[in-house]
Amino acid sequence: MELLSCVEVEPKATANASIIWLHGLGANGHDFEPIVDELDLPSDLAARFVFPNAPEMPVTVNHGMVMPAWYDVYEVAIDAKVDLTGIHNSVIAIDRLIEREIERGINSDNIVLIGFSQGGAVVYECGLSSSRSLAGILSLSSYFATHHAISPSKANRHTPVAIHHGLHDHVIPELLGRDSEIKIRHLGNPVEYKTYQMEHSVCAEQIDDISDWLARVLSR
């Protein structure tokens, strides 16, 4: 498997941390790139932002239309069947990006995974099952799709997890975010849960919270 193509934003100083940020269904690596300038990170935190592009594939729920996707979506339903093979393949691809950051001189303890919507489902699985100890996992407007099949790793048993969700999200209802919090707490990870007066999106208040959270987990 080749490395995923990525949009990258380098810090002004030599990178001492990496943030791998996955977009949602139908988007691409440029989707969250503008947020980098809005994050007021500490001056001593030189973070490289890596925004991978999901491969293009037919998506069942969108009548087989080919689009960027981390895995197939069969139907819009809370209890819909999950494309475990697709998620597994995406996890392998993100694991390779983690290894590349390590090869570039970043300690795994200074690597954060962030994912929006579909991307959030992938970072749950990738981060919680990774053999590499990570700095943190942040899920935005997503759900814990693989909770029934995951094999959590000891390396990330205490890795902090943050969950953000819109109270008016009609794409992935907020109750799925709350359910993710419960299931991850059962795994033993510390979880921070925040909601916002928004739909399936990102808001200014949330960007401030993401900045604060990144500063905290990357200074441990």
Image (spheres, helix red, strand yellow):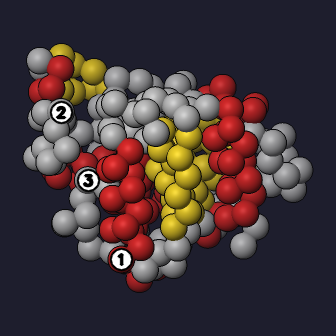
**Residue 97 in the image: above or below residue 99:** above
Q: Residue at x 53, y 46 (%)?
A: 195
Label placed on residue 76: 2
Q: Cβ–Cβ below 8 Å for labels 3 and 2?
A: no
Mark 1: which secondary structure?
helix
Q: Would you say residue 94 is visible in this rendering?
A: no
As measured in the structure, the alpha-carbon distance from the residue carrying label 1 to the one carrying label 2 is: 26 Å
Name which residue lies at 68% across and 56% down. 213
Crowd around label 2: few <14 · some 14–19 · many ≥20 (10 Å): few
Mark 3 nearby-residue class (10 Å; few <14, some 14–19, many ≥20): many
Direction right: furthest residue: 43
Residue drawn at (81%, 42%) of the image: 40
- Observer-nearest of 171 and 149: 171
Query: Sequence order check: which comes first, mark 3 or mark 1?
Result: 3
Nearer the observer, 214 or 79: 79
- Give the residue number, with chain letter if any, for mark 1: 186
Q: Quadrant of the C terminus?
A: bottom right
Kind of residue at badge 1: His
Estimate the x, y position of residue 73 in percent, counting from the top left: 18, 35
Judge left or right: residue 89 versus residue 125: left
Q: In the image, which disc is placed on residue 27?
A: none
Residue at x 73%, y 63% (from the top left corner)? 216
Look at the numbered disc 3 and give the secondary structure of its residue.
loop
| Of marks 3 and 1, the one in the foreground | 1
Quadrant housing residue 192? bottom right
> Alpha carbon of mark 3 to alpha carbon of mark 1: how far?
15 Å
Residue at the spot of label 3: 145
Coordinates of residue 67 in the picture (x, y in percent): 27, 21
Residue type at numbered disc 3: Ala
